[in-house]
Amino acid sequence: MRLVFSPIVMMVCLAVANAADLNGKWKGDMKTPNGDALEINFSFHVDGEKLTGTVTNTYGEEQITEGTVKGDAISFIILAGGGQFKITYKGKVVGEDLKFNVTIGDMGEGELTAKRVK
């Protein structure tokens, strides 16, 4: 039993150690489906694989829901406009950047790269 248990504990510890540290503030610019540029600010808090925080832009601040971080993958949803728009963020840590594919309800998709605010 001890031989089986030790590798499992090591794998769990490695998975936690390899998870990207996304805690803190991030800033990015996204081109919206209609061609406008939109600055987006993120405030992330990661606890294990659970991601919480806020997303702020010129339209206001929204809470992150259904947020997860698994290794270098990150995903979450915000409900903007009083819940009228479901915006889904799916991304990956690439070097020191976060690269997202953003789905804005039925309006379309956009790409966004965010950098940590120092």
Image (spheres, grey):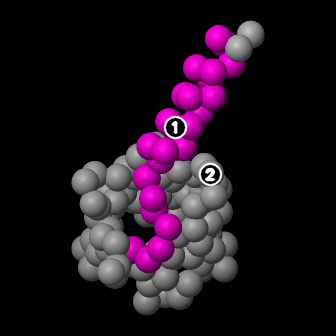
What percent of the width, then of the height, locates residue 49?
60, 49
Name which residue lies at 65% across and 11% down.
3
For the point 63% across and 28% down, the residue is 9
| Residue kind at label 2, given as amino acid type | Gly
Question: Magenta stretch: residue 111 in it?
Answer: no
Mark closest to the chain's N terminus, 2 or 1? 1
Rendered residue at 63%/58% (across/down)? 47
The local crowd at label 2, few if under 14, some if 14 to 19, many if 20 or more residues have their Cα within 10 Å, is: few
The label on residue 106 is none
Please give the residue where the numbered disc 1 appears in the rendered image.
15
In this rendered view, identify the residue nearer to me: 118 or 107. Answer: 118
Q: Main secondary structure of the magenta part?
A: helix
Label 2 to label 1: alpha-carbon separation:
10 Å
Numbered badge on residue 48: 2
Task: Read off the magenta span.
Answer: 3-26
At x 33% / y 81%, what residue is drawn? 118
Q: Quadrant of the N terminus?
A: top right
The image shows residue 39 at horizontal and vertical percentages of 34, 81
Image quarter of residue 51: bottom right
Horizontal side of 1 relative to 90 (left or right) equals: right
Residue 114 placement: quadrant = bottom left
State how many labels appear: 2
Please provide percent x and percent y for residue 64. Answer: 60, 68
Element on which disc 1 rests: helix
Q: Is residue 14 magenta?
A: yes
Towards the viewer: 20 or 65:
20
* Lateral position of residue 97 relative to residue 43, left or right: left
